Image (cartoon, helix red, strand yellow):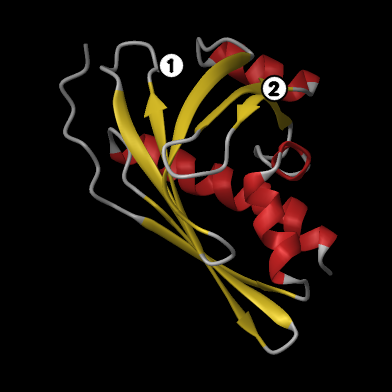
Amino acid sequence: MSTQARSEAKVVVERTYRASLEDVWDLWTTKEGFESWWGPQGFRAAIHEIDARVGGTLRYDMIADTPEMIAAMKKMGQPPSHGVTSRFSEFQPHSRLLLTNVIDFIQGVAPYESHVLVELSEVGDKVRMVVTLSGMHNDQFAQMQKEGFTSQLTKLDKRFE
């Protein structure tokens, strides 16, 4: 098992979209919404269970779905897909949710939890979304987390252009 110190670096990402609060909320809380954008470029999510409420479960597979990403995962010694289990630790409809993810799919690293805090607010005819990601098990993975999340947000950026 790894004995590396956990990264304390949090990642905060903010976007403002010309969309309704309901539309952005649904991206985080419905199967169709989540699958439509979750995962960095070259990856997709396949939802097995989503129970959007306090204590509810979110289970999905993160799947490399391009030949380039499959090859990159193989080069890193990782499978092309892995299961993720999360729970909705906080749930305030249309304003705030906290996903607690179990990170148990990294070889040589003891399982731990990470958090994704989503805060939404209306700003005129737009929605402001602030996402705070907790630190990972080391700085290298924290940087990969930041790059991956920024990459997947490009899917939403294009949707709401």
Sequence-first tag of 1 and 2: 2
Rendered image quadrant of residue 89? top left
Expressed as whole percent of the image width and height from the top left, the position of residue 72 reads: 63, 20
Task: Report the quarter where the C terminus lies.
Answer: bottom right
Residue at image location 25% in from the left, 42% down from the top:
7
Expressed as whole percent of the image width and height from the top left, the position of residue 22 reads: 72, 64
Q: Nearer the viewer, residue 95 or 118?
A: 95
| 11 relative position to 23: left or right | left
The disc labelled 1 sits on which kind of residue?
Answer: Phe
Q: Nearer the viewer, residue 114 or 142?
A: 114
Residue at image location 74% in from the left, 23% down from the top:
68
> Separation of disc 1 and disc 2 at Cα?
15 Å
Total count of labels:
2
- Which secondary structure, mark 2? strand
Expressed as whole percent of the image width and height from the top left, the position of residue 27 reads: 70, 51
Rendered image quadrant of residue 14? bottom right
- Which secondary structure, mark 1? loop
Expressed as whole percent of the image width and height from the top left, the position of residue 133 reads: 41, 51
Task: Report the quarter where the N terminus lies.
Answer: top left
The disc labelled 2 sits on which kind of residue?
Answer: Ala
Label 2: which residue? 64
Mark 1 against mark 2, which lies toward the viewer? 1
Residue 82 position (above or below residue 33): above
Residue at image location 72% in from the left, 36% down from the top:
31
Label 1: which residue? 105
